[in-house]
Each structure stands twice: as structure tokens, then as C-alpha cells.
Image (tube, helix red, strand yellow):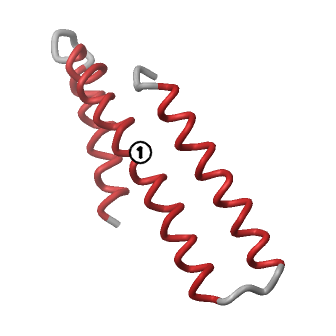
């Protein structure tokens, strides 16, 4: 992975902390809207991480593959991810 691993790691640790907080909120029978807001915040972090990783992948791995015979495989990978994101 060629992304800024420190930034990605920090964001993922934040998301993990939010998930731990969500578990506590559910166990404590907290207000549903508060739980939902926390879920949305966690999803936002994960979307940010995924976007950064995919951008870096396109800017490095796919760009490099354009100069090899591997370009079709890399484009296929990206298309599969785009299909998953579109669902």
C-alpha cells in the first residue's frame, strides 16, 4: 500500500474507537438517534479512508500498470470496486 500509512492508521484507529463507543452505547441502551449519529460518523471516516486508498492506488499502481501488460487487470480491479460502491 502506498498511501500515507500514518494518516490511514490514525483514521482507522479513530474508527475503531468509535466502534468501541458504539458497542458501549448499545450495551447501555442509549438513545437510538445518538447511536445512529455515531454510526454515521464512523461510516464517514471509513469512506474517507477508502477514498484515499483508492485515489492513491489509481495514482500509483494503475498509473504504473499503464506502462505494462497489467493495465487491463488493474482497470478491472477498479471497475469492480466502483460497482461495489455504486450499490
Q: Secondary structure at mark 1?
A: helix
User: Where's residue 56, x and y in %?
Assistant: 31, 29
User: Where's residue 37, x and y in %?
Assistant: 52, 76
Q: Indicate the quadrant where residue 84 lies.
A: bottom left
Q: Considering only vertical position in the picture, is 81 above or below 3?
A: below
User: Where's residue 43, x and y in %?
Assistant: 49, 62
70 or 30: nearer the eye? Answer: 30
Going 59% across and 52% down the picture, which residue do you hit?
15
| Count of all numbered marks drawn on residues in the image | 1
Going 64% across and 59% down the picture, which residue do you hit?
18
70 or 66: nearer the eye? Answer: 66
Q: Residue furthest left?
A: 67
Going 48% across and 52% down the picture, which residue do you hit?
46
Name the residue tied to disc 1: 50
| Mark 1 surroundings: few (<14), some (14-19) or many (≥20) residues within 10 A | few
Q: Considering only vertical position in the picture, is 48 above or below 65?
A: below
Position of the C terminus, as image quadrant, is: bottom left
User: Where's residue 8, x and y in %?
Assistant: 49, 35
48 or 34: nearer the eye? Answer: 34
Q: Residue furthest right?
A: 27
Residue 74 placement, left or right of 34: left
Residue 72 placement, left or right of 45: left
Q: Residue furthest top?
A: 68
Q: Considering only vertical position in the picture, is 27 above or below 9?
A: below
Residue 9 placement, left or right of 19: left
Amino acid at each position: 500500500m502506498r498511501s500515507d500509512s500514518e494518516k490511514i492508521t490514525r483514521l482507522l484507529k479513530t474508527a475503531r474507537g468509535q466502534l468501541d463507543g458504539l458497542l458501549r452505547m448499545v450495551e447501555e441502551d442509549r438513545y437510538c438517534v445518538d447511536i445512529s449519529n455515531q454510526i454515521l460518523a464512523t461510516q464517514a471516516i471509513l469512506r474517507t479512508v477508502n477514498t484515499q486508498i483508492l485515489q492513491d492506488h489509481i495514482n500509483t499502481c494503475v498509473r504504473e500498470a499503464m506502462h505494462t501488460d497489467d493495465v487491463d487487470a488493474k482497470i478491472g480491479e477498479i471497475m469492480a470496486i466502483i460497482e461495489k460502491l455504486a450499490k
